[in-house]
Image (spheres, helix red, strand yellow):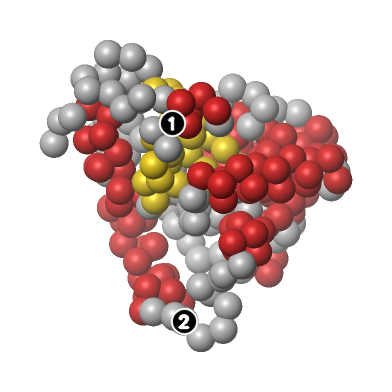
């Protein structure tokens, strides 16, 4: 985190920037593979950037920020559930990613994010685990309950399923996630996915074009 805050804005990838992406497993699109996504069209190495996946839990983030736009009546049209479902379907079609609407009450999403906190300790582990959870809950595959998803996602990500299941119930892991959220709030993060470059927040997959411009100077 301190490396990201200290990173200087690049002109033409003369150095390597550490760009943390603050995300949670419920965000359905693989922005961690930003070199493959149509919205970015730039491999991280070509942009002089190293992407570091940082776990979040959106509900806990909203508690920390003391404001939840999804609590009560929608504060604007973008938070209306009908619009959001249509919007996420459009993005799935654009990215050519299988998407099915999930029964949110079927799973314990906090446990997924706790497991992701542990997975993120391994290089690339957080992103791989999050992708696998998406595939098992909203994508082409399906598992019956929370622990089955964690176990299968860990296996797919090359991680220890038992370690991630235990971490998802562990108070120490929860403390680590809370600490990560405190760091995110201090940086100004207010949603997912959020990229931080040179102390500035770029929120949303539709801002990836601006992030690329900031990294390379190319339009």
Location of residue 115 (image quadrant): top right
Ranked by sequence position, the earlier of labels 2 and 1 is: 1
Q: Which residue is mark 1?
A: 19
In-front residue for pair 105/17: 17
- Residue pushed farthest bottom? 73
Q: Secondary structure at mark 2?
A: loop
Q: Position of residue 131 (x, y in %)?
A: 53, 41
Q: Return the residue found at the far left.
A: 219
Please state if 71 lies on the left or on the right of 43 as rendered.
right
Q: What crowding class fits label 1: few (fewer than 14 Cα within 10 Å), some (14-19), or many (20 or more)?
A: many
* In the foreground, 78 or 133: 78
Residue for point 18% across, 29% down: 217
User: Is 192 situated above or below 210?
Assistant: below
Callout 2: few (<14), some (14-19), or many (20+) C-alpha neighbours within 10 Å? few
Q: Position of residue 216 (x, y in %)?
A: 22, 27
What residue is disc 2 on? 74
- Position of the C terminus, as image quadrant, is top left
Left or right of 159? Residue 94 is left
């Amino acid at each position: 985190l301190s490396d990201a805050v200290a990173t200087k804005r690049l002109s033409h990838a003369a150095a390597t920037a550490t760009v943390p992406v603050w995300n949670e497993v419920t965000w359905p699109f693989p922005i961690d593979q930003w070199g493959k996504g149509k919205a970015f069209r730039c491999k991280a190495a070509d942009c002089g950037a190293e992407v570091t996946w940082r776990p979040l839990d959106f509900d806990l983030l909203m508690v920390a920020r003391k404001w939840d736009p999804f609590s009560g009546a929608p504060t604007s049209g973008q938070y209306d559930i009908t619009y959001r479902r249509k919007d996420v379907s459009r993005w799935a079609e654009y990215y050519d990613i299988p998407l099915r609407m999930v029964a949110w009450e079927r799973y314990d999403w906090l446990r997924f994010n706790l497991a992701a906190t542990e997975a993120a300790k391994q290089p690339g582990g957080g992103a791989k685990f999050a992708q696998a959870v998406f595939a098992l809950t909203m994508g082409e595959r399906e598992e019956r309950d929370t622990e089955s998803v964690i176990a299968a996602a860990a296996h797919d990500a090359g991680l220890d399923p038992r370690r991630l299941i235990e971490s998802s119930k562990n108070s120490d892991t929860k403390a680590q996630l809370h600490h990560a959220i405190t760091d995110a709030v201090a940086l100004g993060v207010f949603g997912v996915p959020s990229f931080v470059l040179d102390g500035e927040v770029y929120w949303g997959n539709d801002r990836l074009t601006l992030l690329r411009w900031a990294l390379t100077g190319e339009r």
